Image (tube, rainbow, N blue to C red):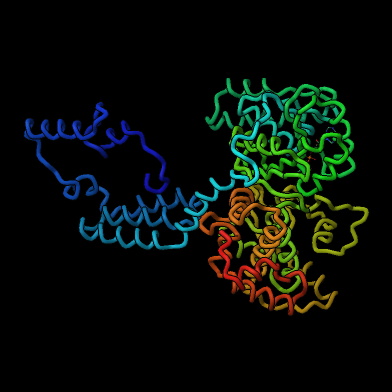
């Protein structure tokens, strides 16, 4: 209970002996008095909680009990101090006399309360409420009704996106380019639902119910009645324009036309239609049925009604939505590109992929950039014909190291997909560096973190400067919900503040001189430091 913070129903507390009695009456005071009178009448012994030693006695010195709890929580609560401190409190309650136990509890509680982790999580709690507020959109903005959805493309994203709506009871029509691809997409959705049912999280009847809400078609003409259309075809501007041109003539008046593009210009997509006010970016994250984040990309001409309706739809499908502006990569991927660029450079300066991944994993990310690339597949966007050994990625792909799916990429994987570092990769990187006469050096963890994280914070300031995010805390919502930034570090902007924006500015200026113009500090960061502006 104390490690999860989940609510425990009153009846259950009674069964556990955590409370003495439940009162039916609305007036707690009267209930308590009645109970007290009953105790006196029945002449029951009055045992103070502190003296109820029988509850803990049997586990005194039982280290295994606590070791087991720690083990069961290790993965889920990695990096969070509070769950571990709670275990220490219970350990103290069990093993020490009451007064000493209370002292341990007091000390640990104070430490948590004064510490950065609690501040970070309180900040995120309020950030999550803030993110729903869009300054120029009034609360009573008229909403469109969304009772049916069309999704184009039944690939990785289209399938997951459709599941969100089926889960919320909203019928979805998926359109694919061929029956074969449609069947494949639908069968993956079914398999996903069946796996969830096998884990007991939904019933077998629910699998059928949700599949029953998903209709598959192979012609865009079938998208003439839906209220919201989400395009999730390949990331290709010409293709997206072709589709939106068709949607403009097919879809009913007033339908919202959305693109799930990861980085393309939503204004350009909207420009091929006669209704740019109804076009918006709805950027889901993979796996789309699981990831909480939704970037709502507001185009120059997107109407307030369409933005407000998209926010309401996000809520219905239980997403945390952040409104962002049109710029390459929007907020999330734009910041990610900074980390990726530095990680790629660092492996040519002497840090190995696993050094970088380990540093970021220890910081609290679920995985580092190279493990992530292996998971996604190194051949995304790679072309065998044009590959010319110009990057480590080229060399790995040319060697058949395409990532997890081929058993090796930056790492080598066993049959359970557990990764290990690989001397072969080290040799490829060394040779590549030597051929280009790059000076390799030892790079410690601290430097890896600075090089990967500080440019992300700088990019966050540029995003704010350009008005691509409404507020600093929205950036943190994006990164904690979509990219695994640990909640106890609050997100890149909160973390930057913890380090000190003046320190980050100093570091960036130095890096700009020594390493190049990509570290040039944002003008807004300079202003914030010079004028001591509070950005939160
Ligand atoms: N994969 C991710 O992690 C991710 C995350 C966020 C956004 N996105 C974006 O989502 C979009 C889709 O990505 P994906 O990973 O699902 O790709 P994918 O290749 O898995 O799926 C794309 C699907 O679109 C179908 N398609 C192509 N042209 C079509 C047409 N004319 N009519 C109907 N269907 C058509 C394809 O047959 C394919 O099944 C891209 O714009 C991508 O940038 C991807």
Is 464 placed above or below 125 here? below
Q: Position of residue 275 (x, y in %)?
A: 82, 34
Image location of residue 532, percent across then percent down: 57, 70
Quadrant occupied by the C terminus: bottom right
Which residue sits at x=24%, y=31%? 27
Q: Residue at x 70, y 58 (%)?
A: 463
Q: Residue furthest right?
A: 385
With respect to residue 168, does 445 lie above or below?
A: below
Q: Quadrant of residue 30?
A: top left
- Position of 477 with respect to 68 (left or right) is right
Quarter placement of the N terminus = top left
Q: Nearer the viewer, residue 213 or 156?
A: 213
Look at the image and tell me whether residue 339 can be seen: no
Label count reads 0
**Does the rendering let one see residue 212?**
yes
Where is residue 525 drawn, in percent x and y? 65, 67
Residue at x-position 69% and y-position 43%: 296
**In which quadrant of the rendered view does residue 22 lie?**
top left
Q: Is residue 148 left or right of residue 7?
A: right
Q: Which quadrant does ligand 1 occupy? A: top right
Of 219 and 533, the residue lying toward us: 533
Residue 485 is left or right of residue 32, and the answer is right
Q: Is residue 509 left or right of residue 3?
A: right
């Amino acid at each position: 209970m104390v490690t999860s913070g989940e609510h425990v129903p009153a009846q259950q507390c009674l069964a556990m002996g955590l409370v003495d009695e439940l009162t039916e009456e609305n007036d707690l005071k009267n209930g308590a008095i009645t109970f007290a009178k009953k105790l006196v009448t029945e002449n029951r012994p009055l045992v103070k909680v502190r003296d109820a030693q029988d509850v803990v006695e049997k586990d005194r010195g039982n280290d295994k009990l606590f070791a087991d709890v720690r083990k069961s929580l290790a993965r889920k609560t990695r990096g969070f101090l509070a769950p571990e401190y709670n275990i220490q409190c219970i350990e103290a309650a069990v093993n020490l006399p009451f007064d000493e136990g209370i002292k341990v509890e007091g000390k640990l509680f104070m430490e948590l309360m004064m510490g950065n982790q609690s501040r970070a999580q309180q900040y995120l709690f309020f950030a999550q409420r803030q993110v729903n507020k869009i300054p120029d959109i009034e609360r009573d903005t008229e909403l469109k009704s969304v009772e049916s959805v069309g999704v184009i493309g039944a690939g990785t994203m289209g399938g997951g996106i459709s599941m969100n709506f089926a889960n919320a009871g909203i019928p979805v029509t998926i359109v694919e380019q061929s029956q074969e691809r449609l069947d494949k997409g639908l069968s993956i959705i079914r398999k996903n639902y069946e796996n969830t049912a096998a884990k007991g999280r939904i019933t077998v009847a629910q699998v059928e119910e949700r599949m029953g809400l998903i209709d598959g078609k192979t012609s865009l003409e079938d998208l003439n009645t839906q209220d919201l259309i989400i395009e999730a075809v390949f990331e290709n501007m010409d293709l997206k324009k072709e589709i939106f041109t068709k949607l403009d003539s097919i879809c009913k008046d007033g339908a919202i036309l959305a693109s799930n593009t990861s980085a393309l210009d939503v204004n350009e997509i909207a420009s091929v239609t006669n209704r740019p006010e109804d076009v918006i970016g709805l950027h889901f994250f993979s796996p789309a049925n699981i990831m909480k984040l939704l970037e709502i990309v507001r185009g120059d001409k997107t109407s307030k009604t369409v933005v407000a309706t998209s926010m309401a739809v996000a809520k219905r499908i239980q997403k945390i939505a952040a409104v962002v502006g049109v710029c390459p990569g929007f907020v999330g991927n734009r910041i990610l590109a900074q980390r990726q660029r530095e990680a790629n450079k660092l492996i040519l300066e002497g840090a190995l992929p696993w050094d970088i991944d380990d540093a970021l994993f220890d910081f609290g990310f679920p995985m580092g950039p190279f493990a992530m690339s292996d998971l996604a597949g190194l051949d995304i966007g790679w072309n065998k014909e044009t590959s010319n050994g110009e990057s480590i990625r080229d060399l790995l792909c040319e060697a058949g190291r395409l990532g997890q799916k081929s058993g090796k990429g930056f790492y080598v994987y066993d049959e359970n997909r557990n990764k290990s570092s690989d001397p072969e990769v080290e040799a490829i990187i060394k040779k590549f560096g030597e051929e280009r006469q790059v000076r390799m050096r030892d790079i410690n963890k601290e430097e890896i973190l600075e090089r990967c994280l500080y440019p992300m914070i700088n990019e966050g300031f540029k995003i704010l400067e350009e008005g691509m995010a409404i507020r600093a805390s929205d950036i943190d919502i994006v990164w904690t919900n979509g990219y695994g930034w640990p909640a106890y570090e609050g997100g890149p902007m909160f973390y930057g503040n913890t380090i000190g924006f003046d320190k980050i500015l100093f570091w960036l200026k130095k890096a700009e001189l020594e390493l190049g113009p990509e570290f040039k500090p944002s003008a807004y960061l300079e202003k914030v430091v010079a004028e001591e502006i509070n950005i939160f």
